[in-house]
Image (cartoon, helix red, strand yellow):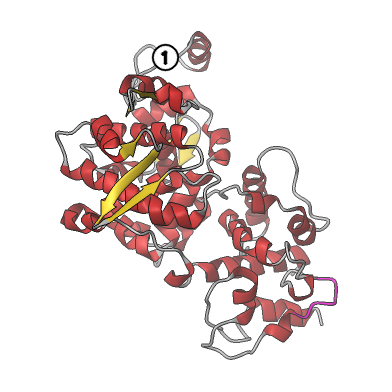
Amino acid sequence: MDILNQKLEILHFINNARWSEENNYYMPEYHPLLDTLKEKKDEAKLLTHWLCYISDRQTLFRRIFKEGAKTYSYIVYRFYTEENESVIDILNACFDAKAKKFKCQDGSKEVSFASRFMPADIVCIYKTLQNLNSNYNRSFGKFLEESCKTSQIEEIQLSPVQNLAVNLYVLTYENIGQPTYEDIITHDDLDEDRIKKFSNVDFKGLNLNKKQKEQIKLKKNFTKQVTSALETNMMLRFDWNNVKFIQKRLWCVIRDFLRYKHFNDMFVKYVGSTFSIESNQSLLKDLELPGDVWNQNDKFKNCFWGKDKLPDKGPLPKNIREFYQKQSQDNNTLQFIPEDYDVTFEFVPRMCAKEECVVCPFNTQGDSKVLELCHQKAGSLCPVIKFCSGSNFKCIGTSKCPIQKHHKEDE
């Protein structure tokens, strides 16, 4: 096995270790009222998780899934219980326009949250809830059920995972503007008419400009309005083959729905047992890499790829996908998927940023001491995984460990 494939196998191993135990992941802190929803509780938690990721831009991760999850889950609770209350009224009931924060009461304690890009996030949240209200009877579970299906539009074949990604994009992000607070607030309230100008909540309509209409005529004899929201948006509104590589948070939430047992157990209730990750690991191949600043770290890239450098043109997730497609065609035993590269989020700050090269599992310079960290005690926590990624993972024994295997080969 060549050096690059050895590194890919080790990267795959470290990423799988990250998802092997639930205590490796920060659990969202839901509002206690969410548990009173009974049969709708699980879809409400999945929706809360999506709203949290919408706000995950230059905001501390723990704040998002603590104060953010608490306030957003309260909004979701009202969305499911106050059926006669409009989306904008629900948001205004929870929004303090003077403090520019969402707020809720948790017992005697007031919890508040504001994201880094709050005005745009408010528009996305409004668009999401309004589309669920108008098209899915206020049910995120119904949206998931209808979205997780295979589809084909002209030459584009979409797997259920890819289909879900397209529909999430349309549900929340398509044609979203970048407003300021002044653009969306009047008289100390969120202004629905102003928000609509930035959210394009006409989910199924054809709002096409002249150039788009001319493109349609060239592309297809298009004589009637397409009623399918998916077909409409895929064919006419945006180029999904490019859009999909710049949607970090979209792929993060789908990854969590598949990878994280807490969410996957709830997810399969709406989309079926074929989405149980315990029995269908092949679903993970369709996940795109959620692009992140840590993915782009030069020290890691130079060490990991060496002479096998990826192209620098275009988004890294696109380059990783193209690399994976080529490698998987040439190597049917490839131990790597694009999403594996996201473990750099945990790896780079612990290893590359601190120049821990001597104990790096990707060190191929002949001076690696990574095996000196290894205690070789099957069933005990692996110190190598803990040191380089922060994850708890029990040793699987030297005969099965790719770090042991490939570093001993180099001795």
Label 1: few (<14), some (14–19) or many (≥20) C-alpha neighbours in 10 Å: few
In the image, what residue occupies the spot 65% across and 49% down? 293
Above or below, comparing residue 366 to residue 310 in the picture:
below
**Which residue range is magenta in the image?**
364-369
Above or below, comparing residue 229 to residue 39 in the picture:
above
Query: Is residue 94 something one can see in this rendering?
Result: yes
Task: Specify the amino acid type for callout 1.
Answer: Phe
Q: Residue 280: give x, y in percent of width and height.
A: 42, 62
Across the whole image, how many numbered discs are drawn on residues? Answer: 1
Give 295 or 276, whichever is nearer the viewer: 295
Q: Label 1's element?
A: loop
Question: For residue 5, which quarter of the picture?
Answer: bottom right
Query: Is residue 270 something one can see in this rendering?
Result: no
Give 333 or 408, whichever is nearer the viewer: 408
Q: Is residue 366 magenta?
A: yes
Above or below, comparing residue 185 to residue 292 in the picture:
above
Quadrant that contains the C terminus: bottom right
Magenta region, main secondary structure: loop
Judged left or right of residue 119, residue 351 is right
Q: Residue 344: give x, y in percent of width and height.
A: 64, 59
In the image, what residue occupies the spot 28% across and 44% down? 75
Quadrant that contains the N terminus: bottom right
Residue identifier under label 1: 222
Q: Is residue 134 magenta?
A: no
Q: Residue 270: give x, y in percent of width and height.
A: 27, 52
Judged left or right of residue 165, residue 83 is left
Judged left or right of residue 211, residue 105 is left
